[in-house]
Amino acid sequence: MIHDAESLLIGEEGRRSIAYPDSRGKPTIGIGHYDPALVIGVTEWTDAQIDAQFQADYVHARDGIARTWPQIQALDAVRQAYLVSMEFQLGTSGVLLFRHLLAALAAGDWLGAQQNALASDWHKQTPERCERAAQAFFTGEFQQIP
């Protein structure tokens, strides 16, 4: 069950101990950790390695969005979690491109935030993930991941 940003990320990213190609073909392992040095199908991590790297990646994403868009602190925990998830997937520079979405969130315009997410290239690239985030921005409720 999704109840915070960490469980959201684990649900969205999955957990794999053997390196695999992500949706863009980049070598990934653990819980969405990209590393060009990974060998797809060969590099393998222990649970301890996965957990340690995920904690570092999670803190990096959480602190990155908070540092670059401090308005996140005014949002409820659910909307914060989905912004951290965006940061985890798209990086700081990627999230900052969503100027209209961020402005809508800052203004409490939940419908506008939803619409801006759905009108993005992000929606074209990972539609299900984006649709869950857009719905969460609108409702303020965690969305279940199939």
Image (tube, rainbow, N blue to C red):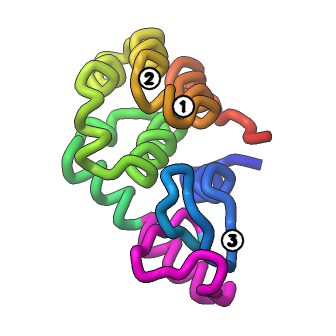
Give the amino acid type for the residue marked by disc 2 in the picture: Ala
Disc 2 and disc 1 in contact, CB within 8 angstroms: yes
How packed mark 2 is, by other alpha carbons closer than 10 Å (few <14, some 14-19, many 20 or more), is many
Are the residues flagged by discs 1 and 3 in contact, CB closer than 8 Å? Answer: no
Dot 3, crowdedness within 10 Å: few (<14), some or many (≥20)?
A: some
From the viewer's perspective, is 121 left or right of 138?
Answer: left
SS at mark 2?
helix
Mark sitting on residue 130: 1
Whole-angstrom CA distance, mark 3 to mark 2, is 28 Å
Question: Earlier along the polypeptide chain: callout 3 or callout 2?
Answer: 3
Q: Quadrant of the C terminus?
A: top right
Q: Is residue 100 above or below residue 7?
A: above
Marks 1 and 3 sit apart, C-alpha to C-alpha, by 22 Å
Quick check: 8 above or below 75? Answer: below
Instruction: Residue 83: name its quadrant.
Output: top left
Tell which tag, 3 or 2, sits nearer the viewer.
3
Q: Give the magenta-colored segment's residue range.
A: 31-58
Q: What secondary structure is marked by label 1?
A: helix
Instruction: Name the residue beneath numbered marker 2.
Output: 117
Q: Residue at x 61, y 56 (%)?
A: 13
Q: Earlier in the sequence, mark 2 or mark 1?
A: 2
Percent of width and height locating residue 140:
56, 26
Which residue is label 3 attached to?
16
As rendered, which of 82 and 91 lies closer to the eye?
A: 91
Identify residue type, mark 3: Arg
> What's under tag 1, amino acid-wise?
Cys
- Magenta-span inclusion, residue 50: yes
